[in-house]
Amino acid sequence: MTAENAAFCYERFMETDKALFLELSSEEMVLPFADRFLVPLVLNSPDSNWVVGQFSKALKRFSPHVPFKQIKPVGYLVLNGEAKVAKLTKADTELSKEDVAAYAELAERFLQLPVFYLEYSGKLGDVSLVRHVKGKLLETELWYGGGIRSVHEARLMAEFADVIVVGNLIYENFSEALKTAEITR
């Protein structure tokens, strides 16, 4: 996401009663107008820069102004090897169902993260994998993002994920994206 996209989202969401979450994936994304901030820890990246490095750089620069009570760390598992985020972070996306489940348990039981995010980034993921991972988590929320282009696809993933992230649908069809926010399990 770019700063321009974040500003676009902010302007659009100001017209709704929905909260705006902003992912702090780089220093450029430290913008003051979100309701909550998400700090991604890319668990399947071999480069620690994408686990804690980016946020530590932001803290070095902005520490006195960081609203820690509004920040939520998120354990990301990037699963689409063709996605920009996979290439940027060098994420190992060739994972078995058991590998993904192990990362989920690592996020919850060892790192005690409040959120585990299955990130397919532009590609609709495997519903059976989402179901399998949900069965491994007791307290950590399961978030799903990637390839959702309709309310129907959002419902498929929302059957098992606690939160669905529609991503590009916000730019492609904002009214359809808002409809996904009304989905309940």
Image (cartoon, rainbow, N blue to C red):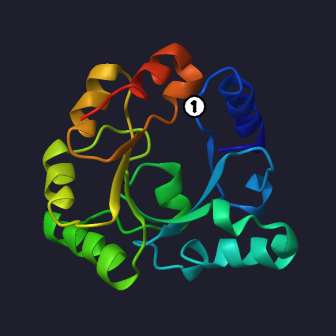
Image vertical order of residue 150 relative to residue 8, above or below: above
Residue 15 location (% of width, % of height): 69, 20
Q: Is residue 6 left or right of residue 116?
A: right
Query: Image quadrant for the C terminus?
Result: top left
Residue drawn at the location 72% of the way across and 33% of the way down: 10
Residue 138 location (% of width, % of height): 23, 67
Residue 47 location (% of width, % of height): 53, 79
Mark 1: few, some, or many residues within 10 Å (few <14, many ≥20)?
few
Q: Is residue 65 left or right of residue 36?
A: right
Q: Quadrant of residue 105?
A: bottom left
Q: How many callouts does the rendering have?
A: 1
Residue farthest along the bottom direction in this orientation: 110
Residue drawn at the location 14% of the way across and 70% of the way down: 98
- Look at mark 1 in the image and give the residue it sits on: 18
Image vertical order of residue 107 relative to residue 137, above or below: below
Residue 7 versus residue 138: which sits nearer the camera?
138
Query: Image quadrant for the N terminus?
Result: top right
Image vertical order of residue 6 relative to residue 142, above or below: above
Residue 178 versus residue 81: which sits nearer the camera?
178
Residue drawn at the location 22% of the way across and 75% of the way down: 102
Q: Quadrant of residue 157?
A: top left
Q: Amino acid at mark 1?
A: Lys
Residue drawn at the location 14% of the way across and 60% of the way down: 135
Q: Is residue 180 left or right of residue 8?
A: left
Residue 155 location (% of width, % of height): 26, 29
Residue 84 versus residue 176: which sits nearer the camera?
176
Q: Secondary structure at mark 1?
A: loop
